[in-house]
Image (tube, rainbow, N blue to C red):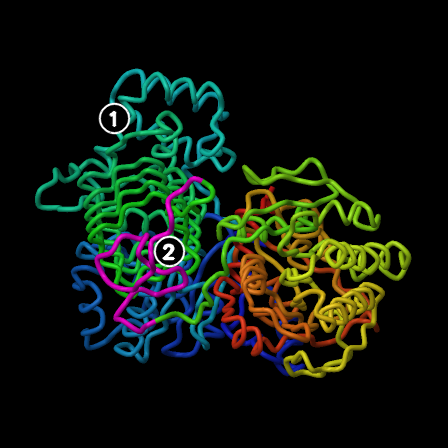
Amino acid sequence: MSADAGVWGWAGELDGQPPDETLAEVAARGPATAVELLTGRLPVGGLLVVTARAGRPRPDAGALARLTAAGLSVEVLRLAGAEIASGGPLRQVADRATPPDVLLLDAPDLAAAGGRPIDGLVLRNLVERLRERLPRTRLALYVSGACFVVRHALPGTLLLTLPPQPDDAAPAEPVADLVDGFASALGGGDPRAVVAAGDLLARRPDFDPLSPPARLAEAVAAGADALRSTVVGLLRRHWPAAPDQTAAPGPDEPAPAPRTTAVLYRLLSSAEPDGPRSTFRQVDVARWWCALRADSYETLSAVTTALRHEDLAGANLAYAPSLEHCDLTGADLSDVDGYRLNASDGALDGAALARSCLARGHLKRASLRGADLTGADLEFASFQQARPHRGRPDRGGPAPRPAGPGRGTALGAVGLGVVVGPPGRRSGAQPPGKDMRIIVTGAAGYVGQAVLARLLHDGHELTAVGHRRQVGWPPGVPARHLDLTDASAARAAVDGAEAVCHLAGLTRVRGSGAAVGPYYRANVVATLNVLDALVARRRDGDDPPRVVFLSSGAVYGPTGHAPVPESHPTAPTSVYGATKLAAEQAVGWYAATGAVSAVSLRLFNAAGSVRPGVGPDDSTLVARALAVASGRSPALPVNGDGTTVRDFVHVADVADAVARAVATPARRPARVFNLGAVPASVREVVAAVEQVTGRRVPVEHGPPNPADQPWLAADTTAARRDLGWTPERSSLERMIEDQWRIGGAQR
């Protein structure tokens, strides 16, 4: 396939249950160029979005010539911050008496527009308005694959994904020589030479700024002052907070590539890991971060995960791109405009947020221990499951302050699970229960690691039980390495527990039929041992211990094409599903006697990641598709035509459901809830993996498996209603991106 031909399709054509003729047409398509689609497929007034698996696609002279030869009038319009801010070029084209037949929109930089960041949503709205003004013009938008326009294309948009685009400016020298050149430039003290040398490093696809060579780290440490001066000057000239008060770049100073600035900042951060720093004074940080995201999510993440103790006082972070998983420990964010800032799952321990505007922002599950929010504007800001510093008098810490909604309060006075706003406005979240002593079995596993992190975040006293010793347990969490199929080991495992999250067991559907004994011992016998141990240690007058059992959607029988409620008949078709059902029934009978208080969660398919290097079983669909994208597998085997549908849910949302189930008041009989979020076919998963990773996933089709249900998805009405559960992170793209970026699937 040539560099100007790629895979293509219509946004939304594979949503739901497309007809067989559509599926056949998609499967038969060959690669196409932008010119072929503009002249043969795209209707008048239509929109073609052109992106690439790696690199940035740009309109080329050859395409212009071919379109002109086809009898079409063509214009190219650069669509960057300055052009959008002035609106002049757009108005000139839209107001023309005879607009062009084809308008190629080259959008290399979405960084600026009149002091406000331009993100993909703004761009999409602008393009749609342009289509209204130019109903007879075909539009082709060349943009980064990370853009909102691509990830959330409107139905009827034609999408073209080109192969990795060659970077003509990529240096041919070995990385070692480029490192020597950067060290020499840094030693010389010439900022332009430093930027030029950093640009060469940034253009090398095999250079990783997160793990610089030792020689480079030594050079940066020795020249930290010179690098600091270079980075600060670069950001202030090209992304100034107050353009009228900042020296503008000279006419001969080109704008640096976003990846270059990210590489330079990341290198500076490696030399100054603990600050204090003042890199962002007089910098429009949100606009710079939008430029980084327009390049790629990896470029943005290289910066936002290295912000410890950074001085962001007075910075403009309004409408900034997502800072999820950011590290802002000890940072100064006082007087910041953070309207709609999203720092969910971030670390802001000890951060200064006094007098900042966080209105309508998202700090869900963020760690805010010791953070100062005195006088902050928190109107409608969401702090669901955020963790302020809290202690208990019997542990020597300060007593928690009473909760109460309102504006201008310190976080200690913000109730957990409350969206701060006018009195009486609360989220649907259930408030967590009191701090409990909780045993987590299967804690070494994929779901277990996520549940540990969430419960620790909620302030519970945890003990991890797992069979693997080479696991990086969270600090302060004791671990017990025990075999729960042994009754005495199970008694030792639950000693001192007020609650048990029983996640341990064997989990593969395929292959369970050849291991009946191991599956019944691991999934049924171990569960009975845990239940017996809890009953044996209970004393008269004690509250029944709480049990949260992780069951499976594999317990259901044939379902048709409707979401499955918990009342649907159970008729498992695998040994794995049969053992899960038997264990779930045992939990229910024990709860019926009042010996335990129990909730069973029927998990369908977990995906995503919350902890670096921790991903799901390699046998899962998303993991296998990502293995192909990373080059670890040559192709993805698929049974049948790829239309089989399964339900996927982010592992972080699974952990949230477990935490809510632990906090659920005791009831008889045991309660059962489905956990799912996004029904998707194999084809849709493959397409999403290709979109997120920018890499092709070859598929090898085999005969259908008669044991596979064609459609299995969860009805989660009960979990949403009774647990207050909302799978907030469970978009298909988000799950795949987290598994690729955080879980280490790209390595």
The answer to whether residue 228 is above or below residue 723 is above
Q: Which residue is mark 1?
A: 191
Spot occupied by residue 50 in the image (x, y as percentages of width and height): 44, 61
In this orientation, which residue lies closer to the viewer: 490 or 378? 490
For label 2, the SS is loop
Residue contact between numbered discs 1 and 2, judged by CB atoms under 8 Å: no
| Overall secondary structure of the magenta section | loop
Which numbered disc, 1 or 2, marks the residue that appears first in the sequence?
A: 1
Quarter occupied by residue 114: bottom left
- Which mark, by number, is residue 348? none
Spot occupied by residue 192 in the image (x, y as percentages of width and height): 26, 28
Spot occupied by residue 657 in the image (x, y as percentages of width and height): 56, 64
- Residue at 89% x, 56% y: name it: 515
Q: Which residues are magenta?
A: 396-425
Is residue 30 toward the left or the right of residue 368 in the image?
right
Q: Which residue is mark 2?
A: 363
The answer to whether residue 598 is above or below residue 53 is below
In this orientation, which residue lies closer to the viewer: 576 or 480? 480
